[in-house]
């Protein structure tokens, strides 16, 4: 028997047999979401500003690894308001939603459809979501309506949202209902009391543990204002609860915080308004993802699944943006130095000197139900830490800081040689020790992302090709730091070790039949003869010979890899190729950007420009012009956009930083603070950019503004303003 199920007075679901269908007019038919974040708190909302307990299940307000609210839905007279539009302000500081009323019949009177304009604005400051709802009557007669809010707090761990099942949970306590507020409470098995407080102003007409209703008498052409705050708290923190800030006070603090953060970044303007939108959105996303830690700013990896510090992600993002915001480098290095492994831990895949893979908060992490409280299962974060340390020094000449973390640098070098090279063959490889850790520990860390030509999985330990490149770059870079500190014997040793590694790498990893490096060597030293984008990252590190770099470039730009939007992680035709998988054929914007940077560093500018253009044009098809974590590796089809990957993080720090690495690489921009030089080495601009202006490009004691103009065969560089002692060099 067929029947209709309704969550609101308008029916939302139709059941035919055992199958449920969502009506097209239902808000549940739109699965697009909006995201807000500040420090440890983030919210995932639908486009109406609601939190629906259905769909993919990721909507909610999250704080320190726990979902503190899983339902918050607005009704007008028991019906969903009509959706008009919604957007996130360009600085990510405010989410604005415009709604209206359906036709309402009440006490013999009719309020016609779209008589009332309902505008919701919300933002997050610290651990609180602030919302203002204005309702304006554009009718000719007074109207009286009831706004109903439904809410719930499930206090599930983020990993439960991702699908983990738990045998036991803590105590979900009875909500405390006050005249104008309700407090949800959960006492976790870890002994932490987690609370969520919803506060309404004015006081609701009715209030209980699942809903609040407010009666509004609306005079024509006048508006009524409702304020709602949703605050999260955990008992192991000293912060005052509840907060004493008003909507206006919190809004002012949020605006001032963004303005102060933005001042620390150089500014980029171009002649292309669409490109400017991409720049501004990417920069705002990065500023939103950056959280202030006790050690300085750190870009959290992505919302919703990776809103926490990741070693590799933080370093990669910072390398993309270091030329614009060197301060970020200090924050990331400080945090990772403070969390560097000092002892062995099998469950954490940790050895002395190893750099953090990720850290997690939340009940499951606290109880050890997941191994990620502090987890070190990343084979490349340690060498990338060294690369960033050297790049940071070159950008800032901050010798004092390098001296402060020198013991961490020495430990990281020791880890590479003592623990990174598992079997003593001269290559750095991984083999999982933790029973619950990651099977694969490179950036492609899916269980099936590393394989042989026939699709079979290799036996460890596994040496990835790009990791050898990262080790090579790390030793070359740290050698320069050693020379700065007067450690010349260490300098000479590291340079020699890097060259030996480069020679050995060329001999052991190159596969003539592929015209590429092998994806990896397994524990038997057999090559994983798979065409993978990993070889492209070898170009970024400089370990590839020029002749082989050219072959790899031609291969990557072939139809096997290049979709028209970006580079597939695995070439079409390989045994485990799947263009809609996570790591085996999809396109990751950061991966494409680093490959483009590598190509251009070897003089293959046109190839790099093609990738630059592909990602720019891809950005035009994504909501808010925000590149997601990844998208499908399906070849470009006419005027259609890229194929979405449904659970990709968006925003995602790597992807947000990609545009800045692409622009830097195209311009051949190198900043050497040790020589007080800014160099544009064979600068080029893609055909969609006629002019680029870089303002407030800063160093230790200098500041400069530069204009770059594209001509048929080169790029002109003009100095607009200069303060301090800095040389501008153009090599064409």
Image: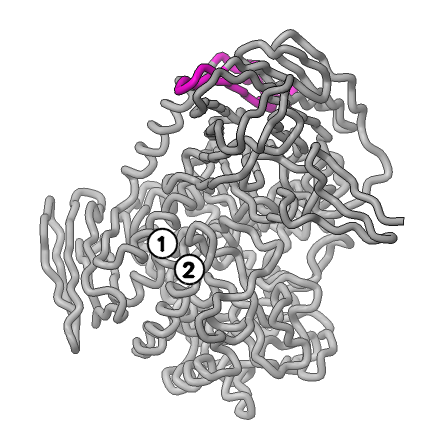
Residue range (magenta): 218-244
Residue at the image position 71 percent from the left and 83 percent from the top:
454
Q: Is residue 449 rendered to the left or right of residue 144?
A: right
Q: Quadrant of residue 616?
A: bottom left
The answer to whether 668 is drawn above or below residue 134 in the figure is below
To which quarter of the image does residue 548 belong? bottom left
Q: Residues within 10 Å of mark 2 (few under 14, many from 20)?
A: many
Residue drawn at 48 percent across, 72 percent down: 567
User: Label for residue 278?
Assistant: 1
The residue positioned 52% from the left and 48% from the top of the image is 301
Check if mark 2's residue and mark 1's residue have beta carbons within 8 Å: yes
* Residue 336 point in image, percent of width and height: 50, 45
* Nearer to me, 699 or 505: 699
Residue furthest top as drawn = 179
Residue 583: which numbered mark, if any?
A: none
Q: Residue at x 50, y 88 (%)?
A: 515
Find the distance from the CA under tag 2 to the CA under tag 1. Answer: 7 Å
Secondary element under disc 1, as helix, strand or loop, is helix
Image quarter where the C terminus lies is bottom left
Q: Please, what secondary structure does the residue beneath circle 2 have? A: helix
Residue labelled with disc 2: 619
């Amino acid at each position: 028997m067929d029947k209709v199920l309704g969550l609101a007075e308008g029916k939302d679901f139709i059941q035919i047999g055992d199958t449920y269908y969502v009506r097209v007019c239902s808000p549940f038919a739109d699965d697009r979401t909006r995201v807000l974040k500040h420090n440890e708190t983030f919210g995932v909302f639908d486009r109406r500003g609601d939190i629906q307990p259905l769909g993919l299940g990721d909507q909610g307000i999250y704080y320190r690894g726990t979902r503190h609210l899983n339902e918050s839905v607005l009704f007008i007279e028991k019906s969903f308001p009509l959706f008009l539009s919604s957007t996130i302000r360009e600085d990510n500081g405010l989410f604005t939603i415009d709604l209206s009323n359906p036709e309402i019949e009440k006490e013999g009177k009719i309020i016609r459809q779209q008589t009332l304009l309902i505008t919701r604005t919300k933002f997050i400051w610290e651990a609180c979501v602030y919302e203002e709802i204005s309702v304006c009557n554009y009718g000719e007669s007074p109207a009286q309506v009831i706004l109903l809010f439904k809410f719930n707090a499930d206090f599930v761990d983020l990993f439960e949202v991702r699908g983990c099942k738990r045998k036991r949970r803590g105590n979900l306590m009875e909500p405390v209902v006050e005249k104008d507020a309700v407090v949800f409470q959960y006492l976790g098995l870890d002994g932490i009391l987690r609370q969520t407080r919803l506060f309404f102003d004015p006081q609701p007409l009715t209030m209980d543990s699942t809903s609040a209703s407010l009666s509004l008498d609306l005079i024509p052409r006048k508006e009524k204002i409702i304020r709602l705050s949703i605050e999260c708290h955990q008992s192991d923190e000293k912060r005052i609860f509840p907060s004493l800030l008003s909507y206006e006070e919190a809004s002012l603090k949020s605006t001032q915080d963004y303005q102060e953060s933005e001042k620390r970044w150089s500014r980029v303007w171009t002649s292309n308004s669409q490109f400017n939108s991409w720049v501004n959105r990417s920069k705002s996303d990065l500023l939103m993802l950056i959280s202030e830690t006790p050690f300085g700013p750190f870009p959290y990896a992505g919302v919703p699944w990776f809103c926490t510090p990741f070693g590799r992600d933080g370093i990669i993002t910072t390398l993309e943006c270091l030329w614009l915001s060197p301060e970020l480098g200090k924050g990331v290095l400080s945090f990772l130095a403070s969390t560097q492994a000092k002892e062995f831990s099998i469950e954490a895949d940790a050895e002395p000197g190893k750099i953090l893979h990720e850290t997690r908060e939340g009940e499951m992490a606290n109880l050890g139900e997941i191994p990620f409280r502090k987890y070190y299962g990343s084979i490349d974060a340690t060498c990338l830490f060294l690369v960033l340390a050297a790049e940071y020094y070159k950008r800032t000449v901050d010798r004092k800081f390098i001296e402060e973390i020198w013991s961490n640098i020495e430990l990281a070098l020791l880890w590479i040689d003592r623990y990174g090279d598992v079997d003593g063959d001269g290559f750095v490889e991984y083999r999982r020790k933790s029973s619950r850790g990651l099977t694969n520990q490179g950036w492609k860390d899916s269980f099936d992302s590393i394989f042989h030509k026939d699709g079979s999985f290799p036996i460890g330990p596994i040496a990835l090709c790009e990791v050898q490149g990262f080790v090579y770059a790390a030793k070359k870079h740290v050698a320069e730091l050693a020379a700065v500190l007067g450690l010349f014997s260490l300098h000479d040793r590291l340079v020699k070790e890097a060259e030996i590694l480069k020679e050995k790498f060329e001999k052991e990893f190159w596969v003539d039949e592929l015209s590429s490096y092998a994806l990896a060597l397994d524990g038997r030293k057999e090559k994983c003869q798979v065409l993978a984008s990993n070889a492209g990252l070898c170009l970024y590190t400089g370990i590839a010979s020029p002749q082989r770099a050219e072959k790899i470039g031609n291969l990557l730009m072939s139809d096997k890899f290049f979709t028209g939007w970006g580079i597939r992680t695995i070439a079409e035709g390989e045994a485990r190729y799947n263009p809609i998988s996570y790591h085996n054929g999809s396109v990751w914007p950061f991966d494409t950007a680093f490959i483009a940077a590598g190509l251009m560093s070897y003089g293959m500018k046109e190839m790099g420009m093609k990738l630059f253009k592909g990602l720019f044009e891809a950005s035009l098809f994504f909501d808010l012009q925000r590149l997601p974590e990844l998208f499908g590796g399906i070849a470009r089809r006419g005027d259609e956009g890229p194929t979405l990957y449904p659970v990709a993080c968006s925003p995602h720090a790597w992807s947000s930083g990609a545009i800045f690495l692409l622009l830097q690489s195209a311009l051949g921009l190198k900043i050497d603070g040790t020589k007080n030089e800014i160099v544009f080495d064979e600068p080029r601009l893609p055909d969609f950019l006629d002019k680029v202006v870089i303002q407030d490009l800063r160093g230790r004691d200098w500041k400069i503004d530069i204009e770059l103009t594209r001509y048929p065969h080169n790029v002109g560089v003009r100095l607009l303003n200069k303060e301090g002692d800095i040389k501008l060099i153009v090599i064409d």
